[in-house]
Image (cartoon, coloured by chain):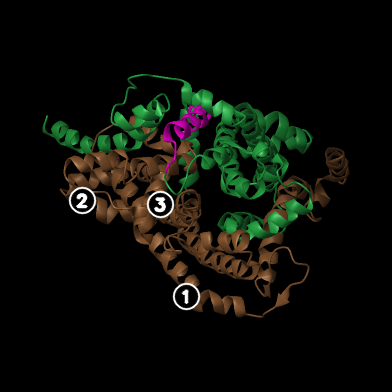
Chain colours: A brown, B green
Amino acid sequence: MLSNNIQAKEKISSRSGPVKRGKKMNIKPFFYLLPSGILISIFIGFPVLYTLYLSFFNWNLISPTKEFVGFNNYINVFTDPTNRQVMFNTLIYIGILVILNFVIPYLISIIVNFFIGKTKGPYKILFFIPSLFSLVVGAMLFSWILNPVSGPVALILRDYGMKLPQWTNSGSLAIIVICLITNWKVFGYNFILLLTGLGSIPKNIIEAAKIDGIPKWRVIWDIVLPMNKSVSVYVLILTIVEGLQYVFTPLNVITQGGPNYGSSNILYHTYLNGFVLYKTGNASALATVTFIIFLILLALEIKFVEGGRKHAD
Amino acid sequence: MQTNRKSLVWHIPLLLIVLVIILPILFMISNSFKTLHDSYNSILSLIPSHPTLANYITLNHQINLIRVTLNTFGMATLVTLGKISTGLLAAYAFHNFKFHGKKIVYFIFIATIFVPFTTIMIPNYLVISKMNLLNNMLGVALPQMCDAAGIMLFLKAMEKVPTSLVESARIDDIPERKILMNIIIPILKPNIISIGAIFFINSWNEYVWPTLILKDKGSFTLPLALQNYISSEGGTNFPLAMALATIMIIPPLLIYVIFQKYILNSISSSGLK
C-alpha cells in the first residue's frame, strides 16, 4: 500500500517537470520519515505529554477517576523528605558516574594514545568486551565478587585480617558498588569514543609542539584537551544521561533502592512510585523533573558539541 | 631503548584494567562448571577440580531454557529489523532531500535521545496494556522499533556515499525507492550489518522495559530469567546463575568475534562530530 502510494506520488512529481519542482512543497521525504515519525509520536511524543498531564493529578494507575491537585506533586518533589533524599542521591550518582565513567576512561585513553606507542588495537578490543553483556550479568557478577561473607574479595581480605563491609546495608556504599557495575559495562565504550577523538587531532600540531621542546603533559593540557573538547563534552553528557538510566538495572536487581531509599535515585524512585507504590502523580512529577534536567543537558550538548562541529567545518 | 622501557611501564596499569575487566567473566564461566560445594571451597581456582554439567541440567529442569532463549531471540530480531528499516528510511530522507522544516524535524528526532525512559514508561505501559500486548514479545518490541541514535549512525554511514551518485540516478529518472534499495543499501551493507549487530546485542540484553511488560514466566527473556536467580537477601545459587549468564553471553560474544572490526568502527564514528 505505502510503496504504491510513494510510486504514484513519484510519477506525479516527475511529470510536473523540473521547473515547478523547486517551488512546490516536496512531500516525498515525509513518506520516508513516516514510519519513524509515527513510532516516535506514539511511543515518545504522546507519552511525554501524557506524563506531564498525569503529574497534575493524584491517581493509582487503575482507578477510573483522577483527582486534580495542581502543582502539589511538584511541590512534593522538593519538600517530601524521601523525594529530597532521592534528589540528593541523584547528585551523588552524577558525581560518581562522572569520575568513574568519564574521568578515568579519559585518563586511560590519553595513556593509550600518547604513551604506549602503537599497540592500541588489543586494548580497544578487550576493554569493549563487557559492553556486550547485560547489566543483569554485571549485577550478578559484582554481587558475587563483593559478597561480604563468601565472595572472593572477602576471602582474600580475610587472609590479611580485614573484612568487607555489608555494603547493601549502607546507602552510600551501595551507590558506589552500583556505579562500579555500570563502569564495568561502559568503560570500554567511553574509552573508544574518547580515544577516537584524541586520534583525530592532527599529528603535526603535536609534533610541532614536541620539536619546540614543550613538555608532554603541557602539550596534552594546553593543546590536546581543548582540541578534543567537543568529543569529551559529548561523552560527559552521555555519561550522565545514559549512566543515570543504566544504574536502574543493578539497583532493581540488587538493592531495590534500599536500605530505606538510601541507594535510590530520581529515576528509580519514579519507577517505584509508578509501578510498586501506585502513586502515579508523584511518579509523573519526578519523571517530568528528570526530563527537564535532561533537556538542560541537551541544551549544553547543542551549545558545545554541535557548535564545535560548525567550528570544525 | 629508553622510550621503550618507559612505554612498558605504561602497559602495567592497562594490563591491570584488562584483568579486572576479563577475570570476572572467566570466573563466571568456570563457576558454571563447578558444584555448589566446589564454588565455595575452591573459590579462587579458575579451573574446576570436578567439572560438571549439573548446573546446566538443573537450569533446564527449572526453566524452559529453549523457550526463554527463543523469546529473547525473537524479540531482539524484531527490534533489530524494525530499527534498521525505520532508521534507513529516515536517514535517507535527511540525507538526500531538501524540505521545509528539515532542521526542526531533525532536532526533534535528536531530542528524543534525551528523553529518559522513566518519562515515557507509564503512558507506554498503559498503551501496551490497552493494545492487549502485555506478556507479549510485540509489546516489548513495538515501542523500541525506532531509535534516533540509530538514525544518526545510518546518517553518518550515508555521508560516505557521494551525493553525485544519487543526483545522477535522479537525472536518469530512477525512482527514489530504487535508489535506496539498489544503490545506497548495497554500498552500506557493512555498515548496516555492524549497526544491526549493535541493535541486536542491545536488545538481547534489554532489561528495564521487558521487566514492566513481561510478568508471565513463560514470556520471560534471558535477562529477566537471570534476575530471578539473583536474590537480594543473599543465598543466591551462584553456579546456577552463572550457568544461565554464560548461555546469555554467547550470542553477543560470537557476533563480536565475527564483526569486531565493523562494530568498533561504528562505535567510534558515533562519537566523532
Quadrant for residue A70, please give it: bottom right
Image location (x, y in percent) of residue B229: 50, 39
Q: In this view, does A182 lie to the left or right of B156?
A: left
Q: How far apart are marks 1 and 3 (CA)?
A: 23 Å
Image marks 1 and 3: residues in contact by CB distance under 8 Å: no
Quadrant for residue B239, please give it: top left
Q: Chain ID for label 3?
A: A
Magenta run includes residue B240: yes
10 Å neighbourhood of mark 1: few (<14), some, or many (≥20)?
A: few
**Residue kind at label 3, given as amino acid type:** Ile
Magenta-tinted stretch: B235-255
Q: Do callouts 1 and 2 point to residues on the same chain? A: yes
What residue lies at 52% left-to-right and 42% top-to-bottom?
B227
Q: Which mark is residue B216?
A: none
Residue where numbered disc 2 is placed: A217
What residue lies at 61% left-to-right and 30% top-to-bottom?
B69
Q: Distance between the residues labelled 1 and 2?
A: 46 Å
Residue where numbered disc 3 is placed: A178
- Asked if residue B206 is positioned above or below residue A84 in the image, the reply reads above
**Residue kind at label 2, given as amino acid type:** Trp
Image location (x, y in percent) of residue A111: 26, 42
